[in-house]
Every structure is written in C-alpha cells, then in structure tokens.
Image: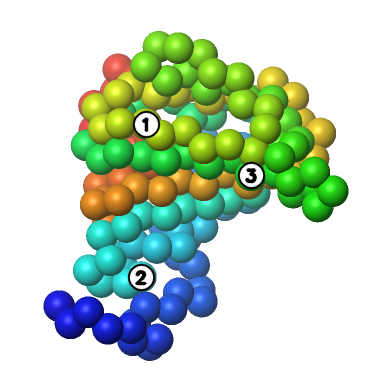
Amino acid sequence: MPKKFDAKKHFVSKPGYEVIPPMVVKGRNHAMTLMSNALVPGSNFYIETGWVFAMPDPPTHIFEHSHDYDEIVIHLGTDPKNQEELGGVIEFVVGGQPLIIDKTSAVYVPKGVSHGPLTWKKFTRPHLEFTIMVGAGSLAQADPGGHEKRKGQKK
Ligand SMILES: [Zn+2]
C-alpha cells in the first residue's frame, strides 16, 4: 500500500455506528466508531468513543472479556477548568484487580488479559470513553466492550 496521505480515503468525517449494545443503557450515547478498516481500509486500527452524559443505568453494562489484541481504554473528563477531573467514579476490573478510575486516565490492557466488568459508582459531569486497538481493524476483531459475548456465553 502506498504510504501517502489521501484525504478522500484517510479523513473520517462521519463516524460509524456499528456497535450494537447488548442492552439498553440510559445515560450513554450510541458508541461512535472513528477508525476501522471499514472506514479507512488497511488502517488496522479500531477506535471507538462515546459520551457518558448521565449516571449509566444499569451501572454495569460492560462485562468481563478479553481480546486477541492489546487495548487502550481512555476515560476523558470534560471540565475545561480541570481536564484531569473525570466527573465520575468507575470501577474497572483488569486481570482480576479492581481499579478505581476517577481521573482522566488511560489503561493499557495487554492482549489476552481478562478485563471487566466496568461499573459506574458515581457520576458528576459528562465524560468520554475511548477504546483504541492497534492491529484490530474491525469491530468483529476488536469487540471492544465484549459487546458480542458475555462471560459464560459463546461467541
Ligand atoms: Zn476490552
């Protein structure tokens, strides 16, 4: 593949909405896919984001799962006066260890490491959640939130 920028192919100005949530979750917008092989063929990146704009109901809606790719999970606050403040408290179990996320932060989850569930404990201000996977170019490969399966459920 030629290594040059082609704005017609490489600029994603319209996100994809391919994620089908496993359940109705109040307080979250439909996740947007901003990069994938469907959007930019050959990119081999999967990036998804979405707003959490109120206390999610149910507070646990991303369950234990793992991937064949490394994943970076970012939670980003929206307070312009304190960009490190998340605006919520989330418990994220990674490798069996509960992490408390209450700041703008990134978690690197190596491939094969079991992670989830994520449980919102508190909400004070809208924040964003990003999933970034290098090498996984499609939702089927990335399965970023374990959307397509649950613990104990077959793929
Ligand atoms: Zn994941």
Q: Answer with mark 1 or mark 2, whichever residue precedes in sequence.
A: 2
Q: Residue at x 39, y 24 (%)?
A: 115
The amino acid at mark 3 is: Leu
Quick one: 137 or 143, which is closer to the camera? 137
Q: Answer with mark 2 or mark 3, whichever residue precedes in sequence.
A: 2
The answer to whether residue 43 is above or below residue 58 is below
User: Which quadrant would residue 116 be assigned to in this image?
Assistant: top left
Is 76 placed left or right of 138 in the picture? right
Q: Is residue 28 visible?
A: no
Residue behind mark 2: 39
Q: Residue at x 51, y 76 (%)?
A: 13
Between the C-alphas of marks 1 and 2, the distance is: 24 Å
Q: Secondary structure at mark 2?
A: loop
Is 155 placed left or right of 1 in the picture? right
Residue behind mark 1: 109
Q: Answer with mark 1 or mark 3, whichever residue precedes in sequence.
A: 3
Q: Is residue 39 visible?
A: yes
Q: Mark 1, mark 2: which one is toward the viewer? A: 1
The answer to whether residue 110 is above or below residue 74 is above
Disc 1 Cβ-to-ligand 1 distance below 8 Å:
yes
The amino acid at mark 1 is: Val
Query: Where is residue 32 shown, x and y percent of the image?
Result: 51, 58
**Could you tell me if the residues under marks 1 and 3 are in contact, i.e. CB atoms within 8 Å?**
no
